[in-house]
Structures are given as C-alpha cells and as structure tokens.
Image (tube, grey):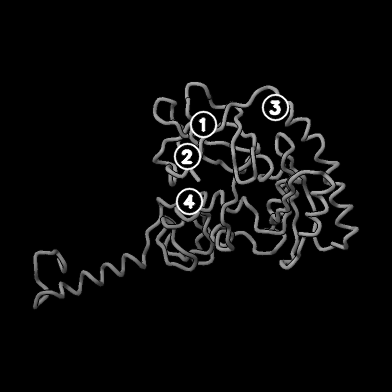
Amino acid sequence: MTTAAATKTETNVVGVRFQKLGKLYHFKVREPEEIDPGDHVILNTKRGRQLGQVIAYVRPEDVHNVKGIKYVSRKATPRDLVMKQVWEAKELDALVTCREKASQQGIKDAKFVKAEYSFDGSWLTFLYTTENKKLNVSSLQNTLSQAFNTKVEMRSIGPRDVAKIMGGFGACGAPRCCSTFLTEFSPISIRMAKEQGISLSPQEITGMCGRLRCCLVYEYEQYVAAKKSLPKVNKRVGTPYGEGRVRDVRVLRESIIVDVEGERYEVFRHELEPLDELEALQKKAEQGCAKHEGGECDCGAGK
C-alpha cells in the first residue's frame, strides 16, 4: 500500500502503525491541529482498544474507501505509554506459560513465537505457526483466558512473519530485511531469480524462513527494463570486432559477451548492431507495399 504525505490543512486522514515495522492503517482525526506525525494515539479496533503511532497525514485520494475509515479515539497520555511498557514486560512470561499449557495439552505441531498485550492489558494475542491446517487451539485458548483473566486471541502466522519476529541475520550476513525495514511482504516468484541470472538452487534463492528471499524483488524491475535493450543469448550481432553471437548478457553493465570467430569480447549496448532485426527490416522493405498492385505507394516501402 502506497501513501503520499500531506499536511493537516489538506486532510484529516492519518496513517497509523501499531508496530515499529507493521503495516500502515488509516484513521480519521477529528481535531487535526491537536495531533502531529509521531504522536501516539488510542484507537478502537476489532481487537479492542489499541495504541498506535501516527506516521503521516495522507491525502484522501490515496486511501481506499475513505467513508469506511474510523476515527482516532484520542491522543495517548503519558500514563498510556507507561501502561504499554508495563504490559510489554509481561509478554515473555505469558509466552512461557502458553508453551507450558500447550505441552500439557499435547499440542506438538505448533510453534508459539510471541505474546502481545494490548497497551492496557485488556487483550492478549499469541502468535504461532504450524503446518497442520486442521490444528484446533480453541481448548488452549480457553485455558489461557482463564489463566490470565483477559480476552485471549490465537493467531496463526506464516514463516516470513516468524522470521520478522525472531530477527537475526540473513544469508548475506546482514540483519534480515524483514526485521529491519520491510513493513510489508511483496509477492516473489522463481521468475524473478531467472530474470537476474541467479542460480535456482535452494541455497541461493531461499531465505532463512524457507521461502524465496525478499531481496529477489529489489532489482527485478531494473533487470527487466535493461534486458529489453539488450539482445538475447545466441542472437547474431554486429560489433566493432566483427559479426558474432551473444554468449552471455551482463544486464547491470549494459553489455554482452560476444563470440567473434572463437574470440570472446565484452561489447556495450551502444556499440551493438542487431543484425537479425536489420535483415528482417530490409527484406520487408524489398517486398514493397502489399496494399497496392506493383508495390508502389506513398508509404515509402520499396524505396
């Protein structure tokens, strides 16, 4: 979801995040002059009252279904922020308890990765991952509701979300993108790796989460755009070294490796002549215009 920053005088719609690297949700503000980007606010959501942070004011045309957007309840107070810290400090103990109760109930094919309290402790969410789509955790949910005396939600998440929560380092040796700056996961396909000439071995294209690496999408559009101006492998081309065939394409360098009479050269895009295309155009011109008898007309074909 893309949004454009706007000023208070242009709109009363704000983008709010509930987590540092979470998705952006839209709400309306009744008194824009009282709330600035960076402020924390209290919002009524499907999961009860939540505390979020205003990221920016957003133009209404950049928001889908403005009429259905809820209003910000109020600006958060210092007490609200302190309460959030207090309940966050209890999340690790809650997670340990959840794992113990799950073990007692014989739940072995689920991994519980995080517990999240709402800012006032009125709602407790447990995030877990499992490959068993038929897993029923309703009994565990009831047990935890009684143990913590609060409303409990059990939410299943995917492998990428687990990696985002766990953090750590990626295969490149740097901190994982998902836990440092990615706010949403983009669709990724094998085709993206093929277009960039990356080996399709699982070790090369699979992230620590077991899914295709998020970084495969970063340069994909640049590769696709650059390839349109370069000939494909095995194409005949004219070069400063003579006529040859393309053996390799170096997209980011905007060059190709050409075989000219057994010798290989790197030739840049501006030095190339696409011989196959030029010959095809020449043959078409020699055929004349098919719309007129004798091939003569004012279109210029055959001249």
For the residue pair 30 and 17, the one nearer the viewer reads as: 30
Find numbered disc 1 in the image and state the secondary structure of the residue it sits on.
Answer: strand
Q: Which mark is residue 3?
A: 2
Q: Whole-Å distance between the Cαs marked 3 and 1?
A: 20 Å
Q: Which mark is residue 56?
A: 1
Q: How many C-alpha atoms fall within 10 Å of the one at disc 4: few (<14), some, or many (≥20)?
A: some
Where residue 97 appears, as percent x and y from the top left, is 87, 47
Find numbered disc 2 in the image and state the secondary structure of the residue it sits on.
Answer: loop
Find numbered disc 4 in the image and state the secondary structure of the residue it sits on.
Answer: loop
Horizontally, is 65 left or right of 178 in the view?
Answer: left
Q: Earlier in the sequence, mark 2 or mark 3?
A: 2
Where residue 252 appears, as percent x and y from the top left, is 52, 49
Q: Whole-Å distance between the Cαs marked 4 and 3?
A: 53 Å
| Amino acid under disc 4 | Glu
Q: Which residue is mark 4?
A: 254
Q: Which mark is residue 81?
A: 3
The reply to whether residue 80 is visible in this rendering is yes
Q: Given contact means CB atoms under 8 Å apart, are the residues at marks 4 and 2 in contact? A: no
Q: Given contact means CB atoms under 8 Å apart, are the residues at marks 3 and 1 in contact? A: no
Q: Whole-Å distance between the Cαs marked 1 and 4?
A: 39 Å
Of tags 1 and 4, which is closer to the observer?
A: 1
Q: Whole-Å distance between the Cαs marked 2 and 1?
A: 9 Å
